[in-house]
Image: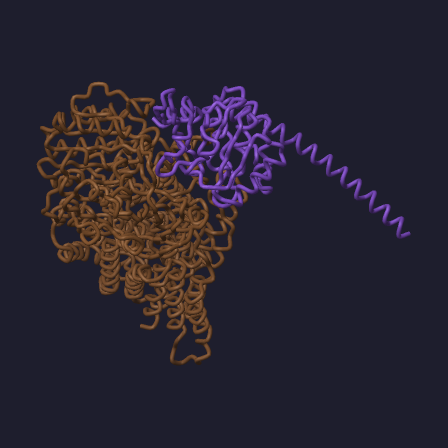
Amino acid sequence: MRVKAAVALLAAATLAFEILLVRALAIEHFHHVAYMAIGVAMLGVGASGALVATAGGVGPAAAKRWFPTVTLLAALTLIVTPALVDRVPLDLTQLAWNAKQWPRLGAVYVLLALPFALSALAILLAITLEGDRPGATYGASFLGSGLGALLAIGVLWIAAPTRALAIPALVGALAAAVAAWRAEVPVKRLAPAAATLALAALVVVRPVWRITPSPYKGLPQVAAYPDARRVAERTSPLGWVVAVDAPAFRHAPGLSLAYAEEFPEQIALFVDGEIAGAVTRWDTSGAHRAMAILEWLPTALPYSLGDRGRVLVLGAGGGMDVWTAVAHGARRVVAVELNTALTRVSAELAPLPTRATTGVDIEWIAGDARAIVARTRERFDVITLAPGGGHGATAGGVHALNEDFLHTTEAYEQYLRLLTPEGVLAVTRWVTVPPRGSVRTILTAGAALRRARPMAMQNGIVVARSWGTTTVLVKPSGFTIAELERLRAWASSRQLDLDWYPGAVAPEARFHIPDDPTLVRAARAAVTHPDSAHRFSAAYTFAVDPVGDERPYPHRFLRASSIAAMLDPGSTSLLPFAEWGYIALVATVVQSAILAAVLVLLPAALRRRVTRGRGGASLSLVAYFSAIGFGYMAAEIALIQHLTLLLGHPVYAVATALASILICSGVGSAWSDKLASRHARIAAVLLATALAIFAVVLLGLVHLLQPAPLVARAAAGIALLAPVSLLMGMPFPVGLRAFARDEHARLAWGWGVNGFASVLAVPLAALIAVETGSRVLLLTSAAAYLVAAASARRESGAGRPAPIEAHSSDPGNARAGDGDVVGPRPRRGGGAYDFFRRTTRSPSFTTALTSVLLLSKQMREILAMLGRYPTHVADSGKCRVAGGASSGPRSPIVLSGVHRHSR
Amino acid sequence: MVRGLGMAMAVGLLAGSAAAQRDAKSDDAIFRGRRLAMVEHHIAAEGIKDSATLHAMRIVPRHEFVPADFRDEAYENHPLPIGLGQTISQPYIVAYMTEVVRPRPGMRVLEVGTGSGYQAAVLAAAGAEVYTIEIFRQLADSAGARLRRLGYSNVVVRHGDGHDGWPDEAPFDAIVVTAAGSHIPPALTRQLRPKGRMIIPVGSVYGAQYLILVEKDAKGALRTRNLLPVAFVPMLSGLR
């Protein structure tokens, strides 16, 4: 019990540390960098197993001796790692051309890997220590991980990121104390753990590291303006919100060039150090004179149509779009904002537009726009989605990998169905050159309108363009001639070009001259026929086709095949078109795959004991443990994605998903001790079947459940996940049981292989989700479990005994092991060569190969690409950015579950 | 003996000083060679044709504008940090922006965001009279001192908020803004002379994405154009 308690605490500490570290690195650098650094560092999980296997394994006696020490060291690294990483002078922006940065990046990788490696080693030792019941020990680590995720999310609500990062060390030190405590040992043996606990407490009070945003982010720059001062700060799992009052700061997204008046006083808002909007101190006394600027923003375009009494603002942030609605005579405004910290900070600094401050019926709703749109029965004259954030981030492609359910075809269709008969949807996006986001918005608007009101295709879309923004208006009832006249007059006075409107033949650009009338062509293709829209996007340089809820990555425009051109060493100047998020993801996959392959093969090459044993053929071992590692993570990522849409709030989604998946898996793992080994195969087949069924029906179920109250949705989510998660917890401990008693090198190797596969699975699964959607990801996970089932025949000896190979001459290897385990006899020639030689004969290999070949064309493209370009990606690195406002891309707090845990 | 030692030291110092002068001269020659090579390979070869721009790029010592640690990288075609989260732009982008605003002797150019002063020096070397504003005092002071030391008498540096432009010296024939914010400041378009041009890059610090060109016609009407620097255009074919 003591060991299991220590394991649970250590698992909780490590998972919480991982989540908080991602947040810290995302603030200091950029999300994509954080993702890559941790993605690679997590290989420490597998490395622990690989190194132990290389050393020949650790027996129960040694495990008993070392478990408390390794747990203590793991707890210490939770303090030492962030302190040392903070002192490495790494400038990732110089990585591409400054060789000095590479060893520093390597040092950061190693430092970051240490806590994960030591923690995984401690759990491996615990499993060895209690070899007869690996499921219970592993279940404890699952349970701990679930609680650790909840702890991290909880801590992020109350503590600033710097202090929050110290909390896991406290839990880790507790784990060390529990691990060291035994009735028969003297109390002084507890001294190191007690000292670590005291040190951790001290670090919580006075952190020994700083979390300071990169100087290239907006926050440090605006904070350095003359007379600037930080006026508010708030933290939440959705990001670290800071407000800076600087007289030189002004924010007016896409302001018309014709505007010639003064600017109001504004306070800058930042989420994770990047601009997320502004709070404006309107002088509402002088007949809204100070609010004149709002009439010159592109987001005011829909109000030129005339009376717009009821307005829905999606992603209200600091309230600028709500003020715009008020300034244009709205009588009822519903303002939706996901990041409540942003709204609270805004309200602290200046009056938010509310009924009390404006006299208008304004309702602020904290939550996700999709969930609210799915539930509301209200109808609106205008639904508006503003560009949010800054221009540069959009151009840099840093949002490329962020899930965003607000700009999918289903989302636009839902918005259109909420409009009054004369209502209009207005979506404003930042311009990029060549055009990307605006083109996708036009095509998505076209696709949604065709679904909602096919008869309105010819007269329901208007596209207006300023120097920096594109606004797409969609009116399902169609624009009248009078309305078009009003739009034209307004646009002309604001120096906006109408690129498309009903009846347009070849609109003339008067104010902003494009190189190519791309938006005109896109709009024409969108309204003409679905085939023409499809042809247009297929022929376009970037991927601009509409995306659905199944593949919610509307900010990703790079085609997989384009990466090849981008990575050509001769075209470094191609970087301007790079989408850093995507490149970093590929870089993470490549780096992880290379390191994992080397570390998996190391024990096989150096230790014969690893590639031989009664537990089954080495290939089967590798196939089994890597398949369940990959399958688990792929399923988890896909399930979290669905749950995010269902619950409509990434924090609730991640908390619910992780808690239910990990805790149920823990129960499944503990229960697996009672199962016969042959049941591993049954569990894997059942899982594959359940996941395949999910692939077909889950998204539909989510859409069906969306209008239900939150409690009902959460209950439904847990009910859906629980049985699958229970099964997901079983295959790994059952697999380990084959070696836990007396084949310690193979136990460690299996642990390591699973660790590598789990860690590599995270970016790989994200890549599959981005390229092919969550449906294919679920099917891939199902395929992985089928591979595991096929391998389990040998690994767990289910069913009939495998035939003994004719060349074997060692009868000792044919004895029955755990239950009915009978593995093939390994050849004496053994080692890595043997391992490879057997590869092509194995049924698990055949199953794996078939599964991969059956996957989509895109998957094959990715694999081909990775094969061809294994090294050049390493010098580019970025991946995820936290958006604050709900109009922007999501900021996944747990980042698709890069978990410490090997599955 | 003491005097002897003193003389020897003095001789030694003189010798050291002569060696330093020789080093400085040879450094200059090395940097000049690198600069010319950079202009040839990364600027002229990438489509910059304006002779005043090329001339300016050939004579302005970029290595004087970068921090000492980065002097050896001064003539490589990438941006470099100069502190306070600011950068000295990629030489190609500096050349491209210079070519777009077409500086000529007698022209008055406003620059918003002095940074290291390199862009101002290039505009000045092409003959323009340059007024440059920097919001960070530390950068404004160091750039001003550097430009004076290097003899750029036709550059005036001021610490201030570029959002308001420089009304006392307006109108300007051209305006160069170092980075786009959420909007184009109205004061700048007002202070642009008819037939004048303003250029603003948009994108992340490392890897400018595109540039916005604002032109004011003879009647004062504004037009904008989004420019993709020519060096980037051929790459698009690779993306198809």
Identity of the residue furthest to the front in this view: A286
Residue A565 percent coordinates (x, y): 39, 29
Residue A751 percent coordinates (x, y): 36, 56
Vertically, is A892 above or below A174? above
Q: Which chain is purple?
A: B
Q: What's the residue at 47%, 62% (across, down)?
A: A208
Query: B19 or A391: which is nearer to us?
Result: A391
Query: A867 or A370: which is nearer to us?
Result: A370
A885 to the left or right of B21: left
Q: How is the image coloured?
A: by chain
* The N terminus of chain A lies in quadrant: bottom left
Q: Is residue A604 visible?
A: no
Query: Dividing the picture into quarters, in which one does residue A307 lie?
Result: top left
Query: A740 or B149: which is nearer to us?
Result: B149
Residue A850 percent coordinates (x, y): 26, 39
- Give the number of marks: 0
A440 to the left or right of A699: right
Vertically, is A139 above or below A103? below
Q: Is residue A269 visible?
A: yes
Query: Dividing the picture into quarters, in which one does residue A530 lie?
Result: top left
Query: A364 or A656: which is nearer to us?
Result: A364
Residue A155 percent coordinates (x, y): 33, 62
* The C terminus of chain A lies in quadrant: bottom left
Vertically, is A471 above or below A669? above
| Colour of chain A as rendered | brown
